[in-house]
Image (cartoon, rainbow, N blue to C red):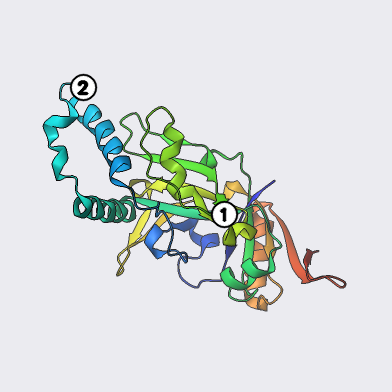
Amino acid sequence: MLFYKYLPIREKDNYFETELLRFTQAGDLNDPFECLPRKPQKGEFTEAIKLITQIISGGSKKFEEYGVEKYNDEYIENTFIQAYQNINNEVGILSLTKSWNNSLMWAHYTNSHKGCCVGFNPDHDFFKDYLSEDTNFARHTKDVTYSDKRVKIPTSLIEPTLAFEPFLTKSTDWEYEKEVRVISTFNLSEKVLEKEPYNIYLFKVPHTAISEIILGVNIDNDAETKIRAFAVEKGINIYKAKISDTKFDMVRE
């Protein structure tokens, strides 16, 4: 099964010319619940602070020495907001899917079927988890989980995968997207475009990772010609989507 990315046709920073794709901040995605665990209760927050205390002191200080009394509701609220802002400043998300023929995603993400859908090889090195020795540079590829409940703030080092839960848990309303996410620190980006309220971080996703391209039903002739030429040059399989004759479905040829 491939990882697919639905793309509109862009005149500037076109992926087929630049190899660059945007990793988007949680705050700039189209779901207001992105990376927002449920607000912690005081007891839950205290457990997280205990854990952090052990780490930063190397076990030399007891939790009580840090003044537990200051962790009131206002402090918890401000820390929660600050943590979300830090996520937006440091980490981006590349949203992919396991489905190429979802009509809603063609409509939403390719400018009403006028773009294309790129299928990537999930075994390519780009999609392998990466962590630098100093842990300052990181990239991870994970499936999204769908739930009716928001996750808690992670409070355990025993299960480090829990740290990804806020990035990887979405409402069941989004289940049709069958999403896979590549999560990366922004310091691995290739190019940064300054913009308000969020900068645009572009990452190099090698063309060698592409297995196939599907053209949209409504793609214009000029764009189709250019992408077909690109596919021929790179030896990439290319198809064109069309409407099923019998069902509310997309097929390709």
Element marked by disc 1: strand
Identify which residue is drawn at 52% across, 49% down.
Answer: 181
Q: Quadrant of the C terminus?
A: bottom right
* Three-letter code for the amino acid on which mark 1 is drawn: Leu
Q: Is residue 138 above or below residue 172?
A: above
| Viewer-closest of 158 and 236 | 158
39 displayed left or right of 183: left
Residue 221 in the image: state x and y as whole percent: 67, 77
| Residues at marks 1 and 2, CA–CA distance in whole angstroms | 41 Å
| Viewer-closest of 28 and 238 | 28
Residue 82 in the image: state x and y as whole percent: 25, 54
Can residue 205 be seen by looking at this rendering?
Answer: no
Residue 164 in the image: state x and y as whole percent: 44, 42
Q: Is residue 248 above or below residue 235?
A: below
Identify which residue is drawn at 16% across, 21% down.
Answer: 60
Identify which residue is drawn at 20% across, 30% down.
Answer: 56
Q: Which mark is residue 59?
A: 2
Residue 71 picture quarter: top left
Instruction: Provide the residue designation for mark 1.
Output: 96
